[in-house]
Image (cartoon, grey):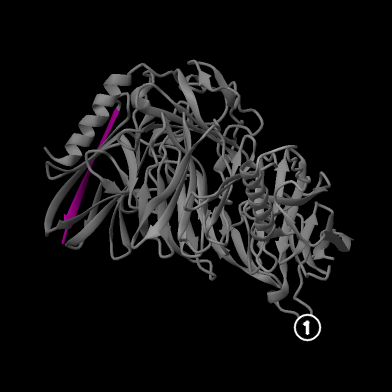
Amino acid sequence: MILYPIWSQTPIGIVVGGSMSDGKGRRVAIAVFAIVVMILAYFFVCTEPLSAELSAVPRWRIDIAATAETALPAGESVEGLLSYSTDTRHGYFWPDGRVAFMADEPAAISDKSYVIPSRNGSGSMLKVPGKPAGLPIEAHLPFFAADKLYSAELDGSGFAAWDQSGRKSWSYAFPCQLSAFSAGDTLAVGGTVDGWLEGVTVDGRKAFSFAPGGSRLSVILGLGVSRSGDWIAAISGIDRQRLVVLGRGGADFRVTSHRYLDSDYREPVRVIVMSDDRHVLYRRTDGIGVWSVDGKVDEVLPVKADDFDVHADGERGLAYLVARRGRKSEIVVFRLPATLLGRISLPDSSDYVRFVGSSAYVGGRTWLARFDFVEG
Amino acid sequence: MRRSTVAALAVSTLALFVASGFDWPIDGGKYRFGFGTPRGVFLRGLEFGSGDGLVRAADDGELAFVSDGPRLPGGYPLSGNSILVLAHASDVSTIYVGMESGSISSYLKNVRRGDVLGRSPEVKAGRGTTVYAFDAKERRYINPMIIMPAQADGKAPVIKSVALSADGLETGIDVSASVRQGTYDLLVDAYDTSPTGAQSAPYDIRVIIDGSERARVVYDAAWASGGVSSLFSARNLSEQSYLAMDGRIRFGPYTFASGRVIITIIVSDYAGNRREQNYSITVR
């Protein structure tokens, strides 16, 4: 591994004057010695590893067409399948580029199951890939979050959780419409248009409610819950907008850090609590903000994005950011908190981007490709 | 003073405060379904469907939130693919759900009454644009009819059917009926005809048994607390217990001893038109 200083590697010149008294000369010598010691100390203490060169290696690219769903081939199981979806198509494929099936209709989908919403008077169907027969389910607006099946209430002011048999486990009504939603393994949180956060446990009970306040107009614009359910980050309010982080403290949640923002968003804003339970990414006008739950990190990734998603590659200490702006999208690789390592532009038709480990699966309506990030 | 009475007074006070302060946002008030109509859930606003298609700001206000797309970050699907929220000087916010995607004036931050916010889809069978009035101070929806200009309405509501239900068994009542003594829920199917001719919710329903008023609901407000949806400021009824799966309204339970029981159902609309129906029950 090559080491290099964070700071500039420009040589530092030291010029010593001509005639001088002995006392003055000693002071200069001590000063020169001190500077040399400081420089040496700097090289040894303030260094960080330079990442090995990272390359995106193409593995395969396939054209995809709609196919009928059939039983999985002998010896294949649901376990290895990856879900694929765009606004008009859904299906499953294997990491080696084989397609299980593709259907020309939208669906709520996870790697284990999917729901075809009702159409033409027929009800919604809950299905498992490889099993063409499904179970009827009364979920009108189904969606998956943290691998759990939920459905939105028709007026947008609540949600319900469903089990794998297609039965409603519980439903939860909020005082008004949701403007933000996020879920972890043990907690789902709704942010409301009147500026409240309300958490719901896995069994449908109220976990907490909290109004960040502190702004002229109250609204929750963005919300992220950590996978563990221990951290919640939200962007709230208008004039001024705030980023607020809540952490689990016993049975309740309390504010662990917050900051005011310069933004004036009136639209949904992406906020993500990363899987390390420490870093929060949020949309800013000047890039993507990186904040730590304790408020000690406050950085900006110079990536302009209307929306983004992030995947942590824990093995390499890297994070892959999928940034979208209009029809343009790119993958940005960075090391936390905000060391940008590289970026790759994606084709305009890249409606689907998914990471598994250090592999990226990118696709449009008619194509799908895989490339792996490798060091070398 | 009881909490429910205070809540009812709060709704009345708010109505007085903002009365005629709002304009009809769509079609001059020709809504399809009114507050309380069963639309999968208890409709907490007014649903519109056609007309000139323009959705206008009900009052001066400020854009608090707008989303024009099928889902929120985090995956939550938006019914009707859009939502727009205006905060007004009174504590009431107006919420517009289901405007046509791509038509929404999301660039407007401060709006004047009558400014065009977007287009409402023309609807034959599905859902149109729904407008909600939300009292941000009390955190409850209020019936928009209360704060919008009054409309001419000469038609009385209709009582389609009344039935007694016990242990999953129903006995329909057609003017008169005979039942065993016991405890029954009263299931009422009633509607008011909306300005577009659709079957919409009434505003006031009273149940009188043997001359004594046993239940009264006024469709003035709806809210949620602790995940449970509640209705009517003076009653605080759970939506789940009030609205049957098929959209009928549930009252009771009432215990009937042997003898003759007279049940009177009085249904009124917001304009005050009233339908009264008496039912004679012989209890064995």
Dot 1 falls on a residue whose secondary structure is loop
Magenta-colored stretch includes residue A60: no
Q: The C terminus of chain B lies in which quarter of the figure?
A: bottom left
Q: Is residue B171 visible?
A: yes
Q: Write the residue at 47% across / 57% down.
A: A231
The reply, left or right, for residue A25 in relation to residue A236 is right
Q: Position of residue A17 (x, y in %)?
A: 73, 37
Kind of residue sitting beneath label 1: Ala
Q: Chain of mark 1?
A: A
- Nearest the viewer among B104 and A68 is B104
The reply, left or right, for residue A285 in relation to residue A230 is right
Snapshot quadrant of residue A145: bottom right
The reply, left or right, for residue B9 in relation to residue A167 is left
Q: Position of residue A85 (x, y in %)?
A: 72, 56
Q: Position of residue B200 (x, y in %)?
A: 42, 35
Please say if B243 is above or below B52: below
Label 1 packing within 10 angstroms: few (<14), some (14-19), many (20+): few
Please say if A310 is above or below A315: above
Q: Position of residue B95 (x, y in %)?
A: 47, 32
Q: Write the residue at 61% across / 62% down.
A: A125
Residue under pointer 1 = A74
Snapshot quadrant of residue A299: top right
For the record, the magenta segment spans B274-284
Q: Is residue B126 visible?
A: no
